[in-house]
Amino acid sequence: MTDAPDPSSLPYRPCVGVMLFNRDGRVFVARRIDMVSEAWQMPQGGIDPGEDPAEAAFRELGEEIGTRAAEIMAATEDWLDYDLPVELIGKLWRGRYRGQRQKWFAMRFLGADRDIDIETEKPEFCEWKWVEPPELPGLIVPFKRDLYAELVKRFAHLADEARRG
């Protein structure tokens, strides 16, 4: 017998994510500090009660990479979700969620690399880099790959717009 809750009985955690493009049309990714494997991801995080998703996206940039120097280029009209692997349910987010439901924003980075500081108050990342959009799904943990592939499909064309800046 197991104490793990039935995943289908749990809600999704409301979140935002940011595909941050630099002036070269490349996308920001950072390697998680809390993973044994090389797990990279784009900035993302929960939406606080009463918080607008766009506000949450800028807050997450500040909290995770130390800068809000960006502007919104596009956003998903719908919410995208992913399920956690069964072995992680109950270990993350105090066991309250089955996965995340996310509103994603494509943003143009307005700063310089020196403005990025991952040594924040509560660091989540140990290193970062800029990558070409098609590289993203191959860098992420397997249970998020489909989501990242969908984001590349929806936002990769904005790389040219970011270059024109």
Image (spheres, grey):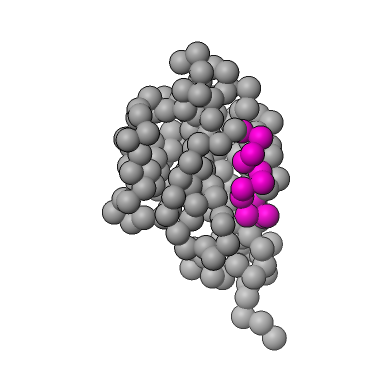
Q: Does residue 159 appear to the left or right of 165 in the view shown? A: right
Which of the 4 quarters of the picture holds residue 37? bottom right
Q: Decide: is 125 above or below 68.
A: below
**Is residue 111 in sight in this rendering?**
yes
Q: Nearer the viewer, residue 54 or 25?
A: 25
Q: Is residue 131 magenta?
A: no
**Is residue 19 in sight in this rendering?**
no
Q: Nearer the viewer, residue 91 or 143?
A: 143
Residue depicted at 54% across the width and 30% down the height: 26
Q: Does residue 35 appear to the left or right of 117 in the view shown? A: right
Residue depicted at 43% across the width and 33% down the height: 54
Q: Magenta residues?
A: 133-144
Which of the 4 quarters of the picture holds residue 103? top right
Q: Residue furthest toward the bottom?
A: 1
Q: Whole-percent x and y of residue 18?
A: 50, 37
Residue depicted at 56% across the width and 70% down the height: 90
Q: Does residue 110 appear to the left or right of 79 in the view shown? A: left
Q: Nearer the viewer, residue 80 or 35?
A: 35
Residue depicted at 61% across the width and 28% down the height: 155
Q: Residue furthest toward the left?
A: 121
Q: Whole-percent x and y of residue 79?
A: 60, 39
